[in-house]
């Protein structure tokens, strides 16, 4: 089966919240995901190995993105990957048409899948050696997700 494309222009933290949407698409369709990410954000070039650990991922392409405006999560957020040299029959643009007023995974899903996303998604980190590292954030939702899984509050 041909993969489903997902484009994303947001920063790396926002990108994490697109993964449950991709996982849901994979689970319901059986089609793996071809990620199309903006080269203008250098960290995207470094996430390929992590994305390839995810069962849902078929391929990762990091491409030149037309335009760019970081203040609103990368604009334009809607781009046809076929126009960027990535041939995909089906694709979804995941980004920010405006400021999110919902849990970010839900916000992305509202634009791509009428609100559907994998609330049980768990990031596969591959083999991990336990450490005494501390996760620091001021965002309660991120702490809740880290400790309790990706189910949004409410």
Image: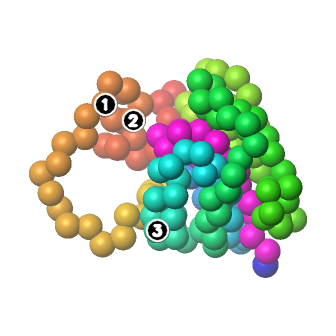
Q: Earlier in the sequence, mark 1 or mark 2?
A: 1
Where is residue 114? Give x, y as percent: 78, 40
Which is closer to the viewer, label 1 or label 2? 1
Element on which disc 2 rests: helix
Pointer 1 and pointer 2: residues touching (CB < 8 Å)?
Answer: yes
Q: Residues within 10 Å of mark 3 (few under 14, many from 20)?
A: few
Q: Position of residue 69 (x, y in %)?
A: 65, 29
Q: Which residues are magenta?
A: 2-18
Q: Is residue 121 above or below residue 126?
A: above
Question: For the view shown, which residue lies furthest in the left direction?
Answer: 132
**1 left or right of 99?**
right
> Can you identify the residue that label 1 sits on?
137
Q: Is 38 left, or right, of 136 in this rendering?
A: right
User: Which residue is pictured at 53% across the width and 53% down the height?
Assistant: 44
Mark sitting earlier along the chain (3/1): 3
Task: Give the residue at mark 2.
Answer: 142
Q: Residues within 10 Å of mark 2 (few under 14, many from 20)?
A: some
At horizontal 40% and vertical 41% (from top left) the residue drawn is: 145
Indicate yes or no whether the magenta region holds residue 143.
Answer: no
Residue wearing tag 3: 49
Q: CA distance from mark 3 to mark 1?
A: 25 Å
Residue 45 placement, left or right of 115? left
Q: Give the mark nearest the N terminus, 2 or 3.
A: 3
Magenta span includes 11: yes
């Amino acid at each position: 089966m041909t993969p489903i494309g997902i484009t994303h222009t947001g920063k790396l933290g926002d990108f994490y919240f697109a993964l449950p949407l991709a996982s849901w698409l994979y689970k319901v369709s059986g089609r793996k995901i071809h990620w199309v990410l903006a080269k203008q954000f250098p960290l995207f070039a470094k996430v390929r190995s992590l994305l390839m650990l995810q069962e849902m991922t078929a391929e990762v392409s990091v491409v030149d993105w037309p335009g760019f405006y970081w203040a609103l999560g990368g604009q334009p957020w809607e781009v046809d990957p076929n126009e960027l040299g990535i041939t995909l029959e089906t694709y979804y643009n995941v980004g920010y048409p405006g400021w999110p007023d919902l849990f970010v995974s839900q916000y992305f899903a509202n634009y791509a899948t009428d609100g559907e996303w994998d609330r049980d998604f768990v990031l596969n980190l591959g083999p991990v050696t336990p450490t005494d590292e501390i996760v620091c954030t001021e965002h309660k939702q991120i702490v809740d997700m880290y400790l309790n899984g990706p189910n949004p509050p409410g």
